[in-house]
């Protein structure tokens, strides 16, 4: 996949309205979260499906189309790629509920980069984050990073969904 093809896929979300959202987590024994907390973000082991009113489903997961790990966008539900994980319906959560039936009015891919080791090696660009803006001012930033103990790690096998700009900036989701 090229950067142009990736950006074109991302831009296909413009004009869509969200109908439903579900998250995917490792099915740890004895651990469950409903993602109802008041943090400005949700941190996921795998990713999310966003179901649109048009019938389209977009899956967001960490992947390696460009470099491991960036944000992958699938035009199929994550169930087609994952098995034995816990699905959590989050459409009615405080953070997502206000975005249901809202139209996505813009999208921006934030490209991070890494440099191959050695002298005169080129930069390799990868999609670190995807910024979705909604009618009425809503915002979602989907990023391939992990937040742990008030610290953060980019290029992670983890997806973090931010709902405000200050937290996305604080944890480096927009620092490409």
Image (cartoon, rainbow, N blue to C red):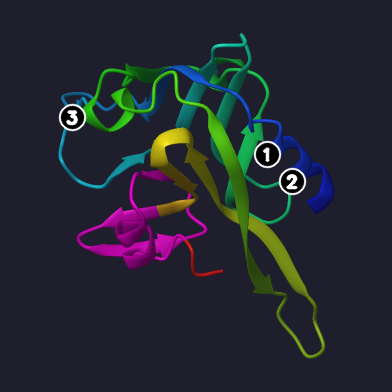
Corner quadrant of residue 173: bottom left
Q: Relative to residue 39, is residue 6 drawn left or right? A: right
Tags 3 and 2 touching, CB below 8 Å:
no
Q: Residue 104 at x, y = what percent?
A: 54, 33
Distance from the alpha carbon under mark 3 to that under mark 2: 31 Å
For this orientation, the residue located farthest to the bottom is: 119
**In the foreground, 119 or 62:** 62
In the rendered structure, which segment of residues is drawn in magenta?
A: 146-173
Q: Which residue is drawn at the image coordinates 71% and 80% (left, top)?
A: 117
Which label belongs to residue 10?
1
On the image, which quarter does residue 28 sit in?
Answer: top left
Per the image, label 1 sits on a secondary structure element best described as helix
Q: Which residue, given by chain and number where applicable, does mark 2 sit on?
A: 7
For the N terminus, give its image quadrant: top right
Count of marks, rendered view: 3
Q: Is residue 19 magenta?
A: no
Q: Position of residue 123 (x, y in %)?
A: 74, 74
The residue lying toward the viewer, choosing from 118 and 18, is 18
Q: Position of residue 31 (x, y in %)?
A: 18, 28
Q: Residue at x 50, y 23 (%)?
A: 50
Instruction: Work out whether residue 138 can be spotted.
Output: no
Q: Tell me the quarter of the picture where residue 63 sits.
A: top right
Q: Is residue 174 above or below residue 136?
A: below
Left or right: residue 73 versus residue 157 is right
**Mark drawn on residue 36:** 3
Marks 1/3: CA distance?
Answer: 27 Å
Sequence-first tag of 3 and 2: 2
């Amino acid at each position: 996949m090229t950067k142009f093809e990736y950006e074109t896929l991302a831009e296909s979300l413009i004009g869509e309205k969200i109908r439903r959202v579900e998250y995917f987590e490792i099915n740890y024994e004895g651990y469950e979260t409903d993602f109802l907390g008041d943090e400005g973000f949700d941190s996921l082991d795998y990713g999310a499906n966003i179901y649109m009113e048009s019938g389209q489903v977009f899956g967001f997961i960490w992947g390696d189309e460009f470099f491991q790990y960036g944000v992958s966008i699938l035009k199929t539900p994550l169930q087609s790629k994952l098995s034995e994980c816990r699905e959590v319906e989050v459409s009615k959560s405080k953070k997502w509920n206000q975005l249901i039936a809202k139209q996505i009015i813009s999208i921006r891919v934030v490209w991070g980069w890494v440099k191959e080791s050695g002298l005169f090696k080129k930069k390799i660009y990868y999609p670190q984050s995807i910024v979705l803006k909604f009618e009425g001012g809503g915002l979602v930033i989907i990023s391939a990073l992990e937040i742990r103990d008030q610290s953060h790690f980019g290029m992670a096998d983890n997806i973090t969904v931010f709902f405000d700009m200050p937290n996305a900036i604080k944890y480096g989701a927009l620092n490409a």
